[in-house]
Image: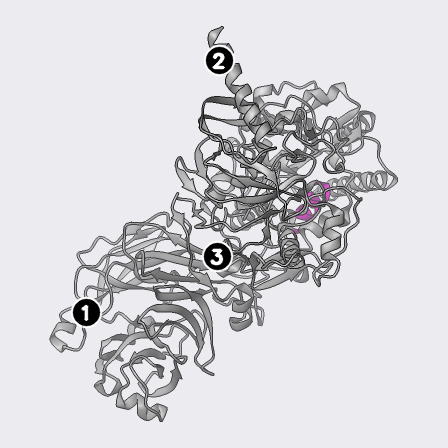
Amino acid sequence: MKNWLTLLFLNCAVLAMVLFGACSNSHYEEQEGSVADAGVPAVDSVKVPVITVDSLRPGMMRIVPNGASVLLGDGKMRVNLNYEYSLGIHEVTCDEYKEISRNEDWYFGLNCGRGLPVSDVSYFEAVLFANAYSKANGYDTVYAYHKPMFTSDGRCVNLEGLETRTDVDGFRLPTEAEWVMAASQTWNPGVNSWNSANSNFTLQAVCALPDSIGFCDFAGNALEMTNDWLGDFRDTVVENYVGTPTGNSLREKVVKGGSIANSIAEMNLDNRGDVYPVTASTLLSYMGFRLAFGRIPNAVWMNGRGKSETSFVKMKAYSSDIQEKIGTRHAKLVFRNGETDNLMYVDFSGGTANVVEIYDSIPVFHPEISPDGMKVAFCTGIEGVNGESSVYVRNLDVNGSELVKLDVKNAAIPRWHVDSNGDTSIVYVDGAGDNSDDAEFFAHATWMVPFSNGKFGKPKKVLNGAYHSGFEKGGNLAVSGARKLRVHANGKDEIWYNGEQACNASLSKDGLKQVLFLDFGGSTGRKFASEKYGVHERLLVADSSGKLIRAIPAPKGYSFDHSEWAGRENWSVATLVNARGEHAKLVLVNVLDSSMIELAEGNELWHPSLWVMPKVFFENEYLDLDSAGMYWDPILQAGEKSVALKMRMFWDMRDTLKMIAVGTSRAERGFDPALIPMPSLNLGYVGGDVWTELYLLDNYVVPHAHGLKYLIVEISPDLMKNDIAVRERKFFKQAPGYIYDKNHGFWKAGVPENFEVVVDANVCYSSEDSLNFVNTRGFLKMLSNGWGPEIRASGDSILSGNEEKNLAESIDSLTAFIDSTQNKGFKIIGLVYPQSPKYAKTGSFGRYGVRRSVAKEIIAFFDSLASVYPHFILMDENKFGAHDYTNAMANDYDHLCAAGAEHLSARLDSLIKSLEK
């Protein structure tokens, strides 16, 4: 009894401190004890923030942390905030959004009610509003960006080069830590929330349910965007944490508080997402935001490996710039961070162009990207310096995974090489020191080692002499530049450039055999340029005979270093060195007209290498590399990446597949191909329905999966009322890959050679993707959360006129498909996936409505088709709730977890075995 009374007293004391703190400006001493409330992180020692009305900014509260800290990630990471900030009393309303935005060029028009939270806006549109709000109130803007991108109907789906200037006093979205610090003081969704039980799934006017401090709607009403990118937490203490630098592979944002679509039980302070991924371009009818104000001193970003970052390499060029200059955005840049010795890379193909640093204890010099753009080779020694060096290869991903080392005594300056048979090797030298002395130079050799399937083969010597600057196919031309410009041409060793000092040489790989190099202001170069210049102040180009053909001047105040040919003819990359000797910029140089654009800016940026996707020729034309196989627009469709991953898997596996399942997220989470003893693929995905099923079946599966034996087609009556135009527009009329396929007849007359290579390059697997989709052949393994304490039904079970029309059309279209495939040689299994048995106690078939009486007619109709079409079978695993899928087999209201998928897949396998007999 004593312990219970003590705990009660302490909880009441803390609550009293919060309540009185809202009305005074006094600071509190540390209150020892334990605070434990539903959804409120428990801590052993608490200091309470002081929260008062912000007298300078109407509609906001001023928060003084007062030594308080925030626990994020179920108490995993403690965040200390040592600055004051302001936070909106309520979510930004439609009226406020319209008032500020209506005169802005980017304003798209809103149709929403007075006093309601603004919703159906993207993170980017919230950012634009925050900047406009700052300007309207006489403050500087917090957000800076390179270029906005809009859809045809005026919606902002990207702010290229977006940067949060944390040192600026202005309006912005709150960080997750700021949001939680304020929300946790009186968190009580059971009292202060609009939720699925009391809102009728409709947004409500703000501040109808205020808390005791003066804030409104932290829990429920509109789901709230924060400024943080979604990333993993670490078991550590962080000062002034502002999220991860770039987020995960989907570029998801952290959202907080729950919404009108959530039950009270689902609302807690640790939740950071919605039922499906929320990216910076996501639009949701129940998602909005509130504003914060104030600079964040010494802001700390935490990357995926737990490294704190307070500054970054600043990008100066983005995907649109690269596409404009070299004809495609499919390019990747790697370079050395001279301050940390780490490898850094930028993938321009994703539309975001963020710098990623691979943290490691291995020093990195002279990195070069593999021909397929997926790996990077590098060494631990530097050109012109004798000493030990090793060559490594690793994946070009955030973790630098699958690191392998070449097991030789000494290896330096690796360069990828593809021979006439298409075999990939790495050319390296066993010594990269000063090459001016003949004896020293020829005491070393040039080597070639095969590399395939992530492993090195057996090295072989290909030339005497350390020709580390390039090795042409066939070995007819090799170059070395480390004091002298040495060349091995047609079996002879020569010295070019009249024997004058030269370095940083690079041999082109475009067949022109041009040599790029730097000199020391020598007489030969000055004579060709017709002017005097200093060390490394000209980027020189020689043709295959050694004759100078170009002399490109460095920008005023800079000199060149680390020059390399890029992956497109007539383009090169280099470092610019300022007057202080700092390798301050990376540039892309057009050697034909001497123009250049800055790629990145920092303190010490070394050894750039730019890979560009090779061109693919097909039937008298080059494939459009920015369209062919691009089944996912990373800007417009960030949350729909899974279908693109599965399209890549489909093209890679199409000749061997025996079973394919199509459908929605119910199929994606409910069918495990690994449990079927034949090559199988799960093509279900979030947002699918009967129309997307038919689109994939008619245009891809049936024409190209020639060995197919079984086709699993999801039948979900509650998802058959969707509009075909809406679904096709969302998936197949946004991603350029589907449009490109359609313009080429979906390749039914023949698939281009190397088409799979283009698809693979356009739809890259991250380590996260491999874990979630690729290794499981499209099956998304989910945890067991049960069917849920309550059922969720979105939408009326009574159909509108248009919905009745859509339902009839979808049934007719699916029936027509079944009819058209009678002689295709495969069987179709119509599968009804199980949903919560609690729907049996309602008038709704499932999560998305449809009266049970209507659903019974639909199921009965498809069951009757088995007597008409011998190749069709109905497998009803839902049975209108009378199924045997237990609570432990469910992930949520209408999805199975891994155990449920195992149960369903085993039953499906038994059915197939009976059919085989």
Residue 781 shows in the view: yes
Separation of marks 1 and 2 at Cα, in angstroms: 74 Å
Q: Secondary structure beneath disc 2?
A: helix
- Do labels 2 and 3 touch, CB within 8 Å? no
- Image x and y of residue 603, in percent: 36, 64
Q: What amino acid does circle 2 point to?
A: Thr
Q: Nearer the viewer, residue 623 or 826?
A: 623
Q: Secondary structure beneath disc 3?
A: loop
The quarter of the displayed image where residue 363 is located: bottom left
Q: Earlier in the sequence, mark 3 or mark 1?
A: 3
Q: What amino acid does circle 3 point to?
A: Asn
- Which segment did they paint magenta? 688-699
Q: What amino acid does circle 1 point to?
A: Gly
**Residue 697 is inside the magenta segment:** yes
- Do labels 3 and 1 touch, CB within 8 Å? no
Q: Earlier in the sequence, mark 2 or mark 3?
A: 2
* Pointer 2 residue: 6
Q: Nearer the viewer, residue 294 or 75?
A: 294
473 displayed left or right of 138? left
* Pointer 1 residue: 433
**The C terminus appears in which quarter of the rendering?**
top right
- Image x and y of residue 808, in percent: 83, 39
**Residue 544 is inside the magenta segment:** no
The quarter of the displayed image where residue 497 is located: bottom left
* Pointer 3 residue: 354
The answer to whether residue 253 is above or below residue 593 is above
The answer to whether residue 493 is above or below residue 272 is below
Separation of marks 2 and 3 at Cα, in angstroms: 52 Å
Please tell me whether mark 1 or mark 2 is closer to you in this view.
2
Separation of marks 3 and 1 at Cα, in angstroms: 34 Å
